[in-house]
Amino acid sequence: MVDKACSACGTGFRCDNDSTQACWCSHFPAIMPLDENKDCRCPACLKVAVKEKIDDFLQQHPAETAIPEQYKNKQLIEFIDYYVENGNWVFTAWFHCKRGSCCGNGCRHCPYDHVNVSQ
């Protein structure tokens, strides 16, 4: 483990990357470009930056376009894949695109045409 300072806001945080395990940031989709002039970001700043990159990606690619495997993360991340509203999980457009198809339930952030698959 290494103590670092966020390259965006200066907040201190712990990098868990070592030879036996991956860092916490490896759970995020690998959509951020590497910038050799900057170091890591804290969890809050990385979440904001990844969300901005995801929004840009979704605007440039239609929902039917498969999301490349390297952008998919196995673990759900709050505010990236979902957020909680009144105790309910609300899935984001990113989550729906990763799933690859519309479930037909008229989800709030469905990037498809809200096709009801039961009809």
Image: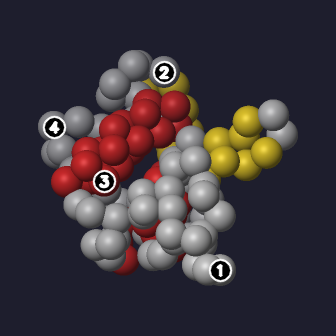
Instruction: Mark yes or no: residue 45 visible.
Output: yes
Looking at the picture, does residue 37 appear above or below residue 119?
A: above
Mark 3 vs mark 1: give the one in front. Answer: 1
- Where residue 86 sits: x, y (%)? 81, 34
Which disc number belongs to residue 45? none
Q: Badge 1: how crowded within 10 Å, few (<14), some, or many (20+)? A: few
Question: What residue type is disc 2 on?
Answer: Thr
Label 3, on which residue? 58
The residue pinned by badge 1 equals 118
Q: Disc 4 vs disc 1: Cβ atoms closer than 8 Å?
A: no
In the visual, does 2 lie left or right of 61?
Answer: right
The answer to whether one can see residue 23 in this image is: no
Mark 2 Cα-neighbour bin, 10 Å: few <14, some 14–19, many ≥20 = some
Measure how far apart labels 4 and 2 are at the Cα level. Answer: 18 Å
Q: Amino acid at mark 1?
A: Ser
Q: From mark 3 to mark 1, how far is it between C-alphas?
A: 26 Å
From the image, state whether disc 2 or disc 3 is nearer to you: 3
Q: Quadrant of residue 107?
A: bottom right
Please state which amino acid type lies under the numbered disc 4: Asn
Tell me the residue that label 4 is attached to.
Answer: 37
Residue 107 horizontal side relative to residue 41, left or right: right
Q: Is residue 56 left or right of residue 37?
A: right
Q: Which residue is mark 2?
A: 11
Q: Find out whether the residues at labels 3 and 1 contact each other: C-beta distance under 8 Å.
A: no
> Where's residue 32, x and y in %?
29, 50
| Of callouts 1 and 2, the N-terminal one | 2
Q: Earlier in the sequence, mark 3 or mark 1?
A: 3
Quarter of the image with the C terminus is bottom right
Residue at (42, 57) in percent of width and height: 111
Residue at the spot 47% in from the left edge and 39% down from the top edge: 47
Question: Which tag, 4 or 1, sits closer to the chain's start?
Answer: 4
